[in-house]
């Protein structure tokens, strides 16, 4: 290559560039971490670099002063106005003329954190919809009279290619003093619309603002709500917080909440109020934890299922309770945060809600698709977002199918006699010895097994309080492996199983995992009712997956991805022993963590991802489990552990 070679330090990234390419452009093309908030206008000085001249035998280079273009008027003006450390250049102004080595000093690095897609390791670049931009505005001219706002819009068009800019009255009232204070240079918090709508000025400061802009990625589930506060300059998660969805008091699952809205006049509004209050509470927690003032929170991205979506928006979900399950709108929504009463945010903060896929398949499934990209998978992947409602995607490059399945809250530890949220003190792992039938377990917050020396002392601080979602799945699967349960899910008696831990409980039996009653602690058992709740949940999940496999015309998938707030903690072996997921080699069961939350973060950090997911959602084939007669057949057959008829050859290995 005859073009000059540019080597960046300390990263070592290098490439050949045509003469005349700016150092900032070269850095961008190579993915070098070099800051810029003025779009290369020589205004912000964030792009400062230090070129090195002389002999560099290590690189086989001799770099002369001519390797870079001479100081230009913009750099001169900057140096004159604000000063520049000796030896530094503005990366947006200095152009490549020969082979050169460029050092990026720490203050010019943004330390961009990229959100990585687990499935294909694709990196999501930071290009958030809400960002800080610095512009230089023409001064007014008596002979060509235009308004200051019109000249600001001209500057945004020319310097940032941002068209159709709107600002509300509050911004307009602050505009003139701010422009003059900043000597015709201002920083704006801009919200860019990707769908042809207007871009909005959310805030304005004189000069180059040092303020950070922050956003929220929110996964609003039927049972739990998770929120991440992210720095919009580099994507870093500053804090995360979670809470129970207070709508639980109106109904544990989605359909009971829809029924509540149907039966109680104003019931939908009560639920809307409850969830909005919960979101404000979560945001307040994040603000407290990070000390980031609410007025710096400029955007929230929300993913949720259709019923949660409608209730959050204040739309009566009654139509979602009956065929044909029509959504009020399935498109993505861009709203003002104050429309949703999210008051612990900046006054003009925006909310983006991902599109819903269908009446029962929500934006949370869309977010999983965004995070895991089934549409670009080369093998057939089954992706399950495990929650109170399981969102299931099956697909590859040839197409993606989606459905949702009402698993109920058992997997989240609700409806389980000793169930609880995944919090310190909850049993999260359990093994049962197949010979002695004795359990050993681990609790969250204590880094050892219950049969290790010192466990009780270590557990004294948290206590042993209950069993969480991943714990109950393991408990039921281990009980089956140890012969405490028959294939229909019936717990055996002490005589039949050979352990006194199987105690009578009414007309059925329970298995005692932990008896803390001597010290006034809880007795943690798995009851017959718990087993039934898990059977219902896992049958619904498996039936949904099988329905999609039927539609696709396959009886096997290549891999399974378990997602969801606790999907990451489910042991693949135990999920398969239960028959939650179809049989695949165990090493083909991957965990994607909270993929819906990751999808929300991707949409928060990358504008292009919003357009992408809106396109993908239009192409997904929706399958409605509620009206598919085969769903019921699959559900009944899946009630057995692992299954009444489907083979699980991988389990016998
Ligand atoms: Fe702002 Fe170079 S990018 S001064």
Image (cartoon, helix red, strand yellow):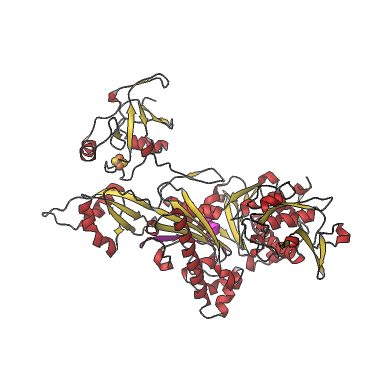
Q: Residue at x 86, y 58 (%)?
A: 497
> Is residue 160 positioned above or below 633 on the image?
above
Q: Main secondary structure of the magenta part?
A: loop
602 horizontally vs 107: left or right:
right
Task: Classify the position of the N terminus by image quarter.
Answer: top left
Q: Quadrant of residue 529?
A: bottom right
> Residue 484 location, x and y as percent?
82, 57
Q: Which residues are magenta?
A: 342-368
Q: Residue at x 62, y 63 (%)?
A: 388
144 horizontally vs 457: left or right:
left
> Residue 318 location, x and y as percent?
54, 74
Number of disc labels: 0
Q: Using the image as rendered, state which of residue 30 and residue 302 is in the foreground.
A: 302
> Is residue 533 positioned above or below 480 on the image?
below
Membership of 199 in magenta stretch: no
Does residue 556 appear in the picture of this structure?
no
Q: Using the image as rendered, state which of residue 509 and residue 255 is in the foreground.
A: 509
264 horizontally vs 49: left or right:
right
Does residue 29 appear in the picture of this structure?
yes
The quadrant where ligand 1 appears is top left
Membership of 353 in magenta stretch: yes
> Residue 344 location, x and y as percent?
42, 63
Task: Classify the position of the C terminus by image quarter.
Answer: top right
């Amino acid at each position: 290559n005859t073009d000059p070679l540019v080597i960046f330090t300390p990263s070592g990234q290098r490439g050949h560039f045509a003469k005349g390419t700016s150092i900032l452009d070269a850095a961008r093309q190579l993915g070098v971490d070099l800051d810029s908030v003025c779009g290369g206008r020589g205004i912000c000085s964030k792009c400062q670099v230090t070129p090195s001249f002389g002999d560099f035998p290590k690189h086989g280079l001799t770099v002369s002063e001519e390797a870079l273009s001479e100081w230009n008027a913009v750099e001169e003006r900057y140096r004159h106005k604000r000063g520049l450390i000796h030896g530094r250049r503005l990366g947006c102004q200095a152009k490549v003329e020969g082979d050169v080595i460029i050092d990026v000093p720490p203050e010019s690095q943004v330390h961009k954190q990229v959100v990585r897609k687990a499935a294909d390791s694709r990196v999501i670049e930071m290009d958030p919809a809400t960002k800080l931009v610095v512009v230089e505005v023409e001064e007014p001219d008596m002979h060509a009279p235009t308004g200051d706002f019109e000249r600001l819009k001209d500057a945004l068009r020319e310097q940032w290619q941002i068209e159709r800019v709107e600002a509300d009255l509050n911004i307009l009232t602050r505009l003139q003093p701010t422009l003059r204070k900043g000597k015709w240079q201002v920083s704006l918090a801009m919200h860019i619309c990707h769908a042809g709508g207007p871009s909005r000025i959310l805030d304005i400061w004189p000069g180059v603002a040092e303020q950070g802009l922050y956003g929220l990625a929110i996964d609003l589930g039927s049972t739990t709500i998770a929120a991440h506060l992210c720095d919009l300059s580099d994507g870093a998660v500053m804090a995360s917080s979670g809470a129970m969805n207070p709508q639980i008091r109106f109904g544990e699952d989605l359909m009971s909440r829809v029924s509540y809205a149907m039966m109680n006049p104003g019931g939908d509004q009560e639920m809307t109020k409850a969830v909005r209050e919960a979101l404000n509470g979560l945001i307040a927690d994040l603000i407290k934890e990070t000390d980031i003032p609410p007025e710096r929170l400029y955007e929230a991205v929300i993913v949720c299922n259709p019923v949660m979506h409608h209730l959050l928006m204040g739309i009566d979900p009654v139509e979602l309770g009956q065929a044909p399950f029509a959504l009020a709108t399935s498109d993505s929504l861009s709203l003002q945060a104050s429309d949703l009463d999210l008051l612990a945010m900046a006054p003009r903060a925006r909310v983006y809600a991902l599109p819903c896929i269908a009446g029962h398949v929500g934006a949370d499934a869309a977010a999983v698709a965004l995070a895991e990209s089934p549409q670009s998978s080369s093998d057939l992947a089954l992706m399950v977002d495990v929650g109170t409602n399981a969102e299931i995607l099956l697909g590859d490059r040839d197409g993606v199918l989606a459905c949702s399945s009402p698993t109920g809250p058992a997997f989240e530890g609700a409806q389980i006699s000793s169930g609880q949220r995944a919090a310190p003190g909850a049993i999260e792992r359990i093994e049962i010895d197949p010979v002695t039938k004795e359990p050993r377990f681990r609790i969250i917050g204590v880094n050892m097994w219950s049969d290790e020396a010192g466990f009780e002392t270590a557990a004294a601080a948290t206590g042993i309080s209950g069993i969480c979602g991943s714990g109950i799945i393991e408990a039921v699967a281990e009980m089956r492996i140890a012969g405490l349960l028959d294939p229909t899910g019936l717990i055996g008696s002490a005589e039949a199983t050979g352990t006194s831990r199987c105690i009578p409980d009414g007309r059925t039996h329970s298995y005692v995992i932990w008896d803390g009653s001597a010290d006034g602690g809880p007795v943690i058992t798995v009851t017959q009712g718990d087993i039934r709740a898990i059977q219902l949940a896992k049958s619904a999940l498996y039936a949904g997956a099988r329905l999609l496999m039927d539609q696709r015309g396959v009886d096997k998938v290549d891999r399974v991805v378990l997602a969801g707030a606790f999907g990451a903690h489910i042991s693949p072996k135990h999920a398969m022993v239960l028959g939650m997921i179809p049989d695949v080699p165990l090493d083909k069961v991957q965990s994607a963590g909270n993929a819906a939350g990751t999808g929300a973060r991707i949409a928060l950090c990358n504008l292009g991802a919003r357009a992408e997911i809106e396109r993908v959602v239009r192409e997904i084939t929706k399958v409605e489990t509620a009206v598919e007669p085969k769903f019921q057949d699959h559900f009944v057959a899946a009630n057995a552990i692992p299954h009444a008829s489907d083979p699980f050859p991988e389990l016998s290995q």
